[in-house]
Amino acid sequence: MIATCTIEELDLFRPEPGGETRARGLGCSPLCVAVLESRGVAADQIPQFLRQQPLVDQLGSLNLGSGAARAASKWSDALRGKSVLVYGDYDVDGVSSTVLAMALAQMSGAARTYYYIPRRSTEGYGLHCEGIRMAAQSGIQTVIVTDCGSRDRSEVALAKESGMDVLIFDHHLVDGELAEADALVNPQIDGDGEARTLCATGVLWCWAAQSGLFPKESLLELVQLAGLATIADCMPLEFLNRELIRQGLDSMRRRPFGGLGRLISALRLEGASLDERDLAMRLIPSLNAAGRLGAADLAVNVVAQLGDAEQNVDSLMKVNQRRRDLSSQIADSLSKQLDTDCSTQVFFNPSWPVGILSGIASRLCHERRQGFALAASTQRGVRGTLRVPEGANAVELLKQLSDKLDDWGGHQYAAGFSVSAAQWPKVALGLNKLLSQVQPVAERHEAILYDPLRIEMDDLGDLAKLGPFGNGNPAPSFFVPSCADEVYEPLGKDGRHLTVNCRGARLLAFGGARQIDDAPGIAGWIYQPRINVWRGRRNVQFVVDKIVLGRGA
């Protein structure tokens, strides 16, 4: 399904004449100049913007916080010859930081290295005393905690009482007293602004690079994990995170780490031309599926190449297909229900898998510009997810119901909550009332007026220098006006896709057949140019991102 907007909601940038001349003087393409100028970069600043700063230069001044030096001083003694447990989390950042910590432990001479990731549906996020007790009974001497742990005071205290060293590498905001670990590296405590943009894997990798404890060539391979997790956690793409992703992709294209190469092949991705979109749309959802529908152990085993590599990848592919099928079934069912009755914005089904609800809620929120809460039963009661459009604040909404919630937290547009089965009916009513009062602000959609026929393969290679694209550095979008002699042709066999032949260019409208047929009047198309690789052949595709409707639509 393709999003729509009206011409009144479109902020259209019209490039100044003479772009070709300016581009020749700057040594880049007119397309690149148009994008930079649309973002307010003056012509004399463009060379500096295009200049890539080496990652090592950025790490020199990076301040991860006071815990970094303590971790470096404790690391070798806590790892060498010891039995080590890496305790992680069930999303891709948790999986990636778990695999990275295991690799670093093995490089440091750990006698044995194990990992433990709690289950989303039964244990939930963070350290748990039961897991700590199991570790103590198994003879674990050192626990490395990744992507959680900063506030788990009682669990860390239990580990210390059991005689274990505890090293924590986290990136979550902290409120209240901190866990008293042997070392706690979390830039949110006292790191600098750049460090606070890192995901947990980024924190651990940058710490390892700064520490001087590990071979540089090994870290240049392991940076793949930091780049992968940075995209997965939607971290803001300032200079450091952009460089982590860029170098991670470069390394992954040359020689994928562990089992990533096998997964890339299974997904039929072109390894030599991988980009951040391939990771965000294909690789990361596949890895996330394990923790959403079962145990994230499967994702760890795939990435770290533990056990039967072929069987693990095959199992992960099946789990991901199941996630996609279930998500589509639930989303389609809710969409049909909302088409006939839009009075309810809170939905509950005891049989829904909790792990996939956030993606479905995000999809509904994006398509309908409304807030939605979806919830399902767990062993401990009811677990739900909340998504709201721009103009609302998910955390503030939950705060108004906090006296009825067991646990809650999140960000402005996305939050999660837990509630007892007894309190759920009251929470559902309260949420529905609050969501019905949300007045989303009018969205603005930025695009550059640019004829797709002017865009060639070399232009996209040049444009890639502005990436990687993502949170804080969005991929540029372009606009082409509709014309009277446009021709729509079916694409594929199921009737969901169309090609739009507009002004001599062929635009691909994936999942847009229904909206185009129902549109009251189309003023134009917001599109994104992409390099498509099929059986070794490369070509430029123009993919419709939004349908722009005429005035008054």
Image (cartoon, rainbow, N blue to C red):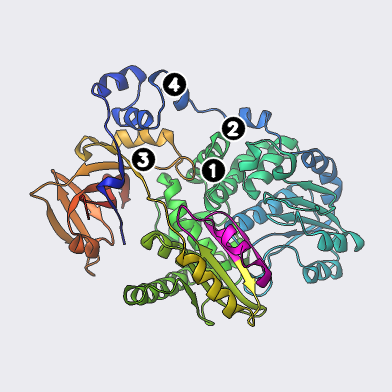
For the point 80% across and 43% down, which residue is it?
A: 71
Q: Quadrant of the N terminus?
A: bottom left
Q: Is residue 407 magenta?
A: yes
| Mark closest to the chain's N terminus, 2 or 1 | 2
Instruction: Name the secondary structure under disc 4.
Output: helix
Mark 1 surroundings within 10 Å by alpha-carbon count, few (fewer than 14), some (14 through 19), many (20 or more)? many
Q: Which residue is mark 2?
A: 55
Question: Residue 236: which numbered mark, if any?
Answer: 1
| Mark closest to the chain's N terminus, 4 or 2 | 4
Q: CA distance from mark 2 to mark 3?
A: 24 Å
Q: Which residue is mark 4?
A: 45
Between label 2 and label 3, give the one nearer the viewer: 3
The amino acid pointed to by label 1 is Pro
Q: CA distance from mark 2 to mark 1?
A: 17 Å
In depth, the one of 71 and 442 nearer the eye is: 442
For the point 81% across and 71% down, which residue is it?
A: 134
Q: Is residue 336 above or below residue 409?
A: below
Question: Residue 476: which numbered mark, if any?
Answer: 3
Q: Position of residue 538 (x, y in %)?
A: 29, 45
Query: Mark 4–mark 2 contact, CB under 8 Å?
Result: no
| Mark closest to the chain's N terminus, 4 or 1 | 4
For the point 68% across and 35% down, which residue is it?
A: 192
Q: Is residue 552 magenta?
A: no
| Mark closest to the chain's N terminus, 2 or 3 | 2
| Mark closest to the chain's N terminus, 4 or 3 | 4
Q: Is residue 88 left or right of residue 51?
A: right
Q: Is residue 330 left or right of residue 176?
A: left
Instruction: Name the secondary structure under disc 1.
Output: loop
For the point 72% across and 46% down, which residue is it?
A: 186
